[in-house]
Image (cartoon, helix red, strand yellow):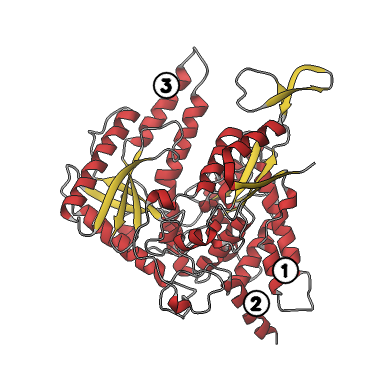
Amino acid sequence: MLSKHLVVNSSKFTSLLPPPLIPHNLQSQPLILPEHFIKLKAAFENTSKDLTDLNLPLQIRNVLPISPSLRNTSIVLPVPFATGNPNFFNECIIQFETTHRWPEEIKSLEDTKTAFLLKICNELLQTKSNYYNAYIVKDESSVPYNDSIKVLRVLTNDGYGFQFRIVTNNDEFLYLKAIEQASKLTSGPSQVSTIENSYIRFMQKYISSVKHHRSIATLVTHFPYYSATVRLFKLWLDSQMILSHIPEEAIELIVLQPFIDPAPYGVPGSVMSGFLRVLRFLANWNWKEDPLILDLSREFNSKYREEKDSYVDKISDKIDLHTYQSMNKSFAKLREHDPQGVKVPYFIATKEDISGKTWTQGISLVIASRLTSLSRVALDVLTRDDKNYEIKDSLLKLIFTPALKDYDIVIKLSSTTLNHKKLRRLTGIMPTNVKFKNLVDSITEFEDTNQVADPVLAFYNDLVSRFGEVIVWSISKFDGVSDASERVITGLIVPGNTCRKFRVGIGYPMKPTKEDGKKEVVALDIDDVLKICATLGGDMIKSIDVKK
């Protein structure tokens, strides 16, 4: 009887994963390795080969993937022509053969990279115009304060999209050189922290992401249920509007914990087991006092050994005692300066990241605390009834429903203005309540970019840029996955940032207030903030609720 209920429960958890938009196909996708991932990887291999065969001034040495879909961990399966998927353009890094002729200044180096991308674009369109469409766009988000970065977007005629950026053996040196020069300046405000932030983001995007991708892509083959578990856990985070606040790389490392360190249990043998074990770990993890140290070492095949000498290296042997002690020292030093985890709440160390903060610095303390609380509540809901082995559908639906009452601000958006069904279709997800799935038409061509753009995400990004310092805004990143007809944007007012001494150029609405008799103290003017939100949202907004 218990075995029967376990099978039923596992199928319930598995069914929560969004079904892909598959025409004339009544059969479900295999759980372990859906064919959509296989087809995407085949398209990537073909595109990589065509790039390396191009006649360029410098030979392309490696094309390195860093996209979640190319390591089987994306929430939504990669469906051809589904440009509504936020991860439709699969990120990749191009590495050229080594040369010492790259420019010695960051902006000049980026301009040279752009010239190479233009050359690649033109060569592709001239030699493979029947299979590719390509164009250059500006990258405004990957490395802050570096507005010279460009990326190459490539569309294949079988419906897949890739986004390429270039890394050289000179990039890291130039960022470190800029930090050193800034530290020597004695006049004017210090720029060291700003440049250090740019360097950290560069290392994340161009170096650490490649190493992370290689390790996860290999471990996915070792643990059959890891891929589906991490996809389901990301879906849960997105339903609770947390996914946009935590890097997917950090999430993938957290979900690995019960797989590579399962004691006292065995390795999870189902999606349900993996999901519940991740919730249990997060519910009990005292991240202020305990580091998470993961040994990701595994035997690599010959393909990875051949790439060992590349600029972006691979993970290697197991963590030895000296490395383990270094990780603990890094954690102790971190907590000396940040005991409450305000700047770096989670310490997640691997042999490639002894500092433990590559993917976790910048995560808000509010978000980290909320994730712990939500994990405890979800675990309690799912395991409360010990006598009833079968988990009810209503309980599963409950834990995937956001707790809107916990937020200070809830902006509800109009379902009539926003076409949710179209967004779901363009994301590549099967429509709900369809009787005959074999009659559902698939997407067979690329939509106009202006028609695909999600106005809600643009509105959300505008709110973050304006008020992100004092309000933690949240949104469901993959809203097309949800069955809910009403979309929401929520806000949590950051404690301690609402009242401060007046200064010119604060950047958001403030009003005079009195605090312990102090003069010239101002507080966040919530009413003015809400008026600005209503103006920016326009017809999209149905209502704005504020907690009293």
The residue that mark 1 highlights is 382
Question: Label 2 near label 3: C-beta < 8 Å?
Answer: no
The residue that mark 2 highlights is 9
Looking at the image, residue 517 sits to the left or right of residue 260; the answer is right
Pointer 2 or 1: first along the chain: 2
What's the residue type where badge 1 is placed?
Leu
Mark pair 2, 1: CA separation = 11 Å
Mark pair 1, 3: CA separation = 55 Å
Place of residue 44 in the rendered image (x, y in percent of width and height, measured from the top left): 32, 60
Q: Image height check: is 8 above or below 479?
A: below
Q: Image height check: is 300 above or below 210?
A: below
Pointer 1 or 3: first along the chain: 3
Mark pair 3, 2: CA separation = 59 Å
Place of residue 320 in the rendered image (x, y in percent of width and height, measured from the top left): 51, 53
Place of residue 519 in the rendered image (x, y in percent of width and height, measured from the top left): 78, 16
Pointer 3 or 2: first along the chain: 2
Name the residue: 35% across, 64% down: 41
Label 3 CA crowd tier, 10 Å (few <14, some 14–19, many 20+): few
